[in-house]
Image: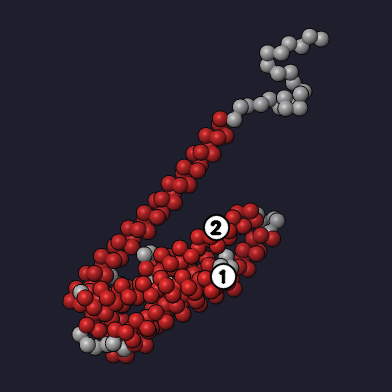
Amino acid sequence: MSTLLPTLITWFHLYGYPVLWVCIFLSSLGLPLPSIFALLAAGAFAALGDFNVVLLGAVALSAAVAGDSVGYLVGRLIGSKLITWLEQQKHFNIISPRTIARSQTYFRAHGGLAILLSRFLVPVLGGPINLLAGAEIYPYRRFFIYDVSGQAICTVILLALGYVFAASWEAVGNVIVTVSLLILALLIVLYLALRLVRMLRGMHASQSQPDVAPGAEEGLIPEEGVKDVR
């Protein structure tokens, strides 16, 4: 659990909804703030009658979408220019234009699912995916739809869990964080496994190709088993 949480909870008691909005907004930008615990605590306080749970949901959702949109805009302004620069570079060919084009095509085809799942399943990936969506010039309308849907699911789940398990909201938060980290580790392992399989297949394909002597394809060297009768 973050060491900032006690301070955040104290401020939340003192100043109410604005503190929750700022916390969720900054967390959506990628800052390491305990937004999951903040929402669970907010749900627990709503169960005690300190706050209105519906208003908490509206505040949290608006802050999350605003932060995600700012992250998207930053990626659009900076990331897209970086990609354009990489495409035009001839002396420092770090990433080939073909690789960039393939990544853009792939993200436009599957980016919506990544945006949706990163809102509530693997929140730690939310900030980077916002930047990537902007850099890949993913249509903002589609980004907004997936973002609002995912953040709405996340907000409802966390507030509901905090409301139901009011006395144990910290324990619930620890379980959620642990599960999220396990899912992230699983995704990394799957990605590395796929890369390894592709590399092994490429090595096997290159080794299975028959060796051809230089000039044989052009008919400069007689094929094996054919005698030169001259």
Q: In the image, residue 201 lies at what x, y percent?
A: 51, 38
Residue at 62% from the left image edge and 57% from the top image edge: 101
Picture disc at residue 174: none
Q: In the image, residue 173 lies at what x, y percent?
A: 26, 70
Circle 1 sits in a helix, a strand or a loop, which is it?
A: loop
Q: Residue 172: name its quadrant.
A: bottom left
In-image side of 3 versus 32 (left or right): left
Crowding around mark 1 (Cα neighbors within 10 Å: few <14, some 14 to 19, many 20+) is few
Query: Which residue corresponds to mark 1?
Result: 139
Amino acid identity at mark 2: Tyr
Q: What colouring style does the render use?
A: secondary structure
In-image side of 92 versus 67 (left or right): right
In-image side of 33 versus 43 (left or right): right
Q: Nearer the viewer, residue 106 or 1?
A: 106
Q: Nearer the viewer, residue 2 or 165?
A: 165
Q: Please state, as top left, top right, bottom left or bottom right, where the C terminus lies in the image.
A: top right
Q: In the image, residue 147 lies at what x, y percent?
A: 45, 72
Residue 43 vs 130, above or below: the answer is below
Q: Is residue 145 visible?
A: yes
Q: Which residue occupies the extreme right position in the image?
A: 230
Whichever of labels 1 and 2 marks the residue nearer the N terminus, that label is 2
Residue at 30% from the left image edge and 66% from the top image edge: 177
Residue at 25% from the left image edge and 76% from the top image edge: 162
Q: CA distance from mark 1 to mark 2?
A: 14 Å
Residue at 68% from the left image edge and 25% from the top image edge: 213
Q: Nearer the viewer, residue 2 or 148?
A: 148
C-beta proximity under 8 Å, tags 1 and 2: no
Crowding around mark 2 (Cα neighbors within 10 Å: few <14, some 14 to 19, many 20+) is few
Q: Which residue occupies the extreme top position in the image?
A: 229
Q: Please state, as top left, top right, bottom left or bottom right, where the N terminus lies in the image.
A: bottom left
Query: Which residue corresponds to mark 2?
Result: 106
Amino acid identity at mark 1: Pro
